[in-house]
Image (tube, rainbow, N blue to C red):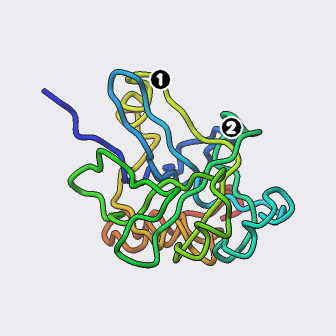
């Protein structure tokens, strides 16, 4: 039986996930290929480094907070950007995410080619987020972690990727699910202090 694609969905770390790389992480899955593996970016880890300090010309187009985000522990020296076009046309230097699963709500989200001159592409984007690094899992590794209870798999929205207050995203994504997950959203950061 084929497993549903996770592309375009969120992986939200359960309180059981203790790995410091992913503790309370919210990961947007960018590509899920059951033969090759899965990649995504952590969307709730802003750094203190301004986009303009790293990528000349792009800072003025970055969504608030206009800082680099730690996308994950793999390839931390490389940059990856996501954006939503301002209009209906696909601008030069932007391509939509491919293979979105049925439950995805990130219909206009795409990858931005940071080699495109910012003055050509920047103004055509309504939202832009830049990540240093990404998260990656080998073939079947992520499915195993989900089966072990490390991740909740939840629908994503464009607003999740471009949240103005990313530090509260873990709680807000869980809270909007209602039921037991809304209760999990109140789980203390350190349960020993409860």
113 or 127, nearer to the observer: 113
Which residue lies at the image location 35% right of the left edge and 46% below the top edge? 7
Q: Which sits earlier in the primary sequence, circle 2 or circle 1?
A: 2
Q: Which residue is mark 1?
A: 138
69 displayed left or right of 22:
right
Contact (Cβ within 8 Å) of mark 2 with mark 1: no
Query: Relative to residue 61, is residue 170 depicted above or below?
Result: above
Q: Position of residue 56 (x, y in %)?
A: 81, 62
Q: Say which quadrant the N terminus sits in.
A: top left
> Which quadrant of the structure image shows residue 74?
top right
Q: Position of residue 191 (x, y in %)?
A: 64, 57
Q: Which residue is mark 2?
A: 73
Query: Relative to residue 37, is residue 122 depicted above or below?
Result: below
In the structure shown, which secondary structural element does the residue marked by tag 1 occupy? loop
Query: Relative to residue 27, is residue 167 depicted above or below?
Result: below
Q: From mark 2 to mark 1, how far is it between C-alphas?
A: 14 Å
Number of marks drawn = 2
130 displayed left or right of 126:
right
Q: Position of residue 156 (x, y in %)?
A: 38, 62
Which residue lies at the image location 37% right of the left edge and 37% below the top edge? 32
Q: Position of residue 188 (x, y in %)?
A: 61, 64
Which residue lies at the image location 47% right of the left edge and 52% below the top edge? 28
């Amino acid at each position: 039986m084929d497993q549903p694609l996770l592309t375009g969905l969120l992986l939200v770390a359960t309180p059981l996930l203790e790995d410091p790389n992913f503790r309370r992480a919210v990961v947007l899955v960018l590509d899920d290929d059951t033969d090759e593996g899965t990649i995504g970016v952590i969307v709730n880890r802003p750094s203190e480094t301004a986009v303009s300090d790293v990528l000349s010309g792009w800072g003025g187009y970055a969504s608030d907070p206009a800082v680099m985000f730690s996308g994950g522990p793999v390839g931390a020296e490389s940059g990856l950007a996501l954006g939503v076009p301002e209009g209906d046309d696909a601008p030069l230097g932007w391509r939509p995410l491919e293979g979105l699963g049925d439950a995805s709500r990130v219909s206009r989200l795409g990858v931005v080619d940071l080699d495109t001159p910012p003055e050509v592409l920047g103004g055509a984007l309504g939202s832009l987020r830049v990540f240093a690094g990404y998260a990656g899992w080998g073939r079947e590794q992520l499915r195993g972690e989900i089966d072990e209870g490390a991740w909740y798999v939840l629908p994503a929205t464009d607003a999740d990727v471009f949240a103005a207050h990313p530090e509260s995203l873990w709680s807000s994504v869980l809270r909007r699910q209602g039921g037991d997950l809304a209760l999990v959203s109140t789980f203390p950061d350190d349960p020993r202090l409860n």
